[in-house]
Amino acid sequence: MPDCRWPSASPLCRNSNRRSLRSAWAQQHHVAPHRANPLDDAAKDFHFRCRLAALIPRVEVNDSRARPPTFNRLLNNVTILREQGWLADPLWINFVMGIPGQVMTTTPKNLLHLAESSPPNVLWLVSAIGGRAHWAMAAMAMAMGGHVRTGLEDNVYLERGVLAGGNAPMVEKMIRLAREIGREIATPDEARETLNLRRNGHN
């Protein structure tokens, strides 16, 4: 499905070191400068361009420190952008897990915390990178009512020691896994309706 990614997670999570920007934002909003957390204009501009192109932004939540307070800051900033009208419903959040040194560790505890900390009435999916964690986190996400993705960008193995050899076998395995859990696969039209996407350039 069409999707428009943030250039990086930093516009949503940065505690800016640019003191002049932080002070100006704080003065405008009547808060102490050391408490200010300005959201970059780049993030807002990017969403505006997605809206003009009828694309749905996918907000990625990740952080190398893998601590719940960091997750909360990211999700809190998503909530702020939503309340200000820069992120329209349906809100689509991707929890990226498992890239060493870059994003949060792939554990059931972290995924549960993310799902429970998300703003209300959002759509979320998990991107678990690599090996057995890819399938385990996908199963957990589907059991929790979330969504998943698969493919060679995230994982190259169907199971331990067995290379996928392409995206199609991975998609087939994900479909089997979903149906064993009791989740049916959305049709293209159902996915468009869920995400409020245009079909062939029309509403």
Image (cartoon, grey):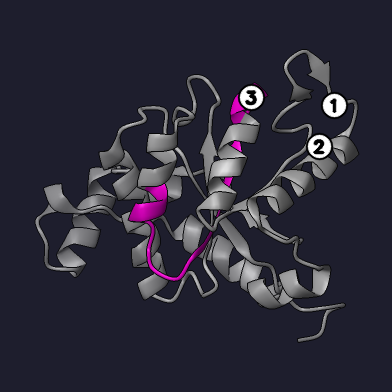
**Horizontal and vertical percent for residue 56?**
64, 66
Question: Secondary structure beneath disc 1?
Answer: loop
**Horizontal and vertical percent for residue 41?**
44, 60
**Quadrant of image for the C terminus:** bottom right
Q: Is residue 63 above or below residue 32?
A: above
Does the CB distance between marks 1 and 2 fall below 8 Å?
Answer: yes
Q: Is residue 58 above or below residue 72?
A: below
**Horizontal and vertical percent for residue 78?**
40, 59
Q: Nearer the viewer, residue 82 or 129?
A: 129
Quadrant hosting residue 1: bottom right
Residue under pointer 1: 164
Q: Is residue 130 left or right of residue 113?
A: right
Separation of marks 1 and 2 at Cα, in angstroms: 7 Å
Residue under pointer 2: 170
Residue at x 41%, y 55% (from the top left corner)? 40
Q: Is residue 131 left or right of residue 201?
A: left
Asked if residue 12 lies in the magenta stretch, the reply is: no
Separation of marks 3 and 2 at Cα, in angstroms: 13 Å
Query: Visible in this render: residue 11?
Result: yes
Residue at x 80%, y 75% (from the top left corner)? 189
Question: Secondary structure beneath disc 2?
Answer: helix
Q: Is residue 51 left or right of residue 110?
A: right
How many other residues sit within 10 Å of disc 1, few (<14), some (14-19) or many (≥20)?
Answer: some
How many other residues sit within 10 Å of disc 3, few (<14), some (14-19) or many (≥20)?
Answer: some
Region of the chain picked out in magenta, as a range: 114-133
Query: Visible in this render: residue 6?
Result: no
Q: Is residue 8 above or below residue 88?
A: above
Q: Which mark is residue 132?
A: 3
Among the two numbered marks 1 and 2 on one chain, the one whose residue lies closer to the N terminus: 1
Report the amino acid beneath label 3.
Answer: Arg
Among the two numbered marks 3 and 2 on one chain, the one whose residue lies closer to the N terminus: 3
Question: Secondary structure beneath disc 3?
Answer: helix
